[in-house]
Image (cartoon, grey):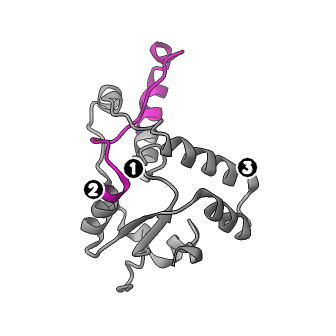
């Protein structure tokens, strides 16, 4: 059931069951902070690799609960197969290279390749990473039906 302007889908069908730290929007926000920090003095960072993670590494059901708390309604996670999800993205005319990348990332998540936790964000920015709940609360306007419809398609086969 959708309520008011916070019409982010109540069911989020995506083919991941491990932490989504590599794909979540708070990670993008952390990345921007880190890039700004690195550009201030890039020399000591040349050749280094940083893993930008949130304050915890959890499963997708946990993240659905965090969205629920931030949006004030129940959001559930539903694991779906990559194939139908990939085809739904292609039907919506998403670029093939983007769909292939997302499908590959989904497979890597399923294999646990992004299940990690580091203090790199804190070390690089002197600020702790933002939690998913905090990010969603601070950016709740993004989670409208219009914004959600531009993102992942719903899965009609998982009925």
If you read the primary sequence from the N terminus, does the residue marked by circle 1 or circle 3 appear first? 1
Crowdedness near tag 1: few (<14), some (14–19) or many (≥20) residues, C-alpha within 10 Å: many
Q: Position of residue 46 (x, y in %)?
A: 53, 16
Check residue 48 for magenta coloring: yes
Residue 26's disc is 1
Quarter in which the N terminus is drawn: bottom left
Determine whether label 3 and label 2 are within 8 Å by CB: no
If you read the primary sequence from the N terminus, does the residue marked by circle 3 or circle 2 appear first? 3
What is the quadrant of residue 47 in the picture? top right
Q: Position of residue 103 (x, y in %)?
A: 62, 51
Check residue 56 for magenta coloring: yes
Which residue is under mark 3?
A: 97
Question: Label 3 to label 2, Cα distance in Å?
Answer: 31 Å
**Is residue 107 toward the left or the right of residue 30 in the image?**
right
Against 73, residue 51 (above or below) is above
Crowdedness near tag 2: few (<14), some (14–19) or many (≥20) residues, C-alpha within 10 Å: some
Q: Position of residue 58 (x, y in %)?
A: 31, 47
Check disc 2 and report its element: helix, strand or loop.
helix
Against 81, residue 106 (above or below) is above
Crowdedness near tag 3: few (<14), some (14–19) or many (≥20) residues, C-alpha within 10 Å: few
Check disc 1 and report its element: helix, strand or loop.
helix
Check disc 3 and report its element: helix, strand or loop.
helix
Against 91, residue 101 (above or below) is above
Which residue is under mark 2?
A: 134
Identify the residue at horizontal 34%, vertical 50% (top origin).
59
């Amino acid at each position: 059931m959708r309520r008011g302007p916070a019409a982010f889908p109540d069911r989020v069908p995506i083919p991941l069951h491990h932490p989504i730290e590599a794909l979540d929007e708070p990670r993008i926000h952390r990345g921007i902070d880190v890039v700004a920090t690195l550009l201030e003095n890039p020399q000591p960072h040349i050749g280094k690799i940083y893993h930008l993670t949130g304050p915890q590494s959890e499963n997708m059901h946990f993240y659905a609960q965090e969205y629920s708390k931030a949006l004030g309604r129940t959001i559930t996670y539903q694991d779906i197969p990559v194939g139908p999800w990939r085809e739904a993205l292609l039907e919506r005319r998403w670029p093939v290279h983007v769909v292939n990348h997302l499908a590959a990332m989904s497979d890597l998540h399923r294999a646990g390749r992004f299940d990690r936790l580091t203090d790199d964000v804190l070390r690089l920015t002197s600020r702790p990473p933002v939690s998913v709940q905090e990010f969603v609360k601070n950016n709740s306007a993004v989670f409208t039906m219009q914004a959600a419809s531009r993102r992942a398609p719903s899965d009609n086969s998982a009925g």
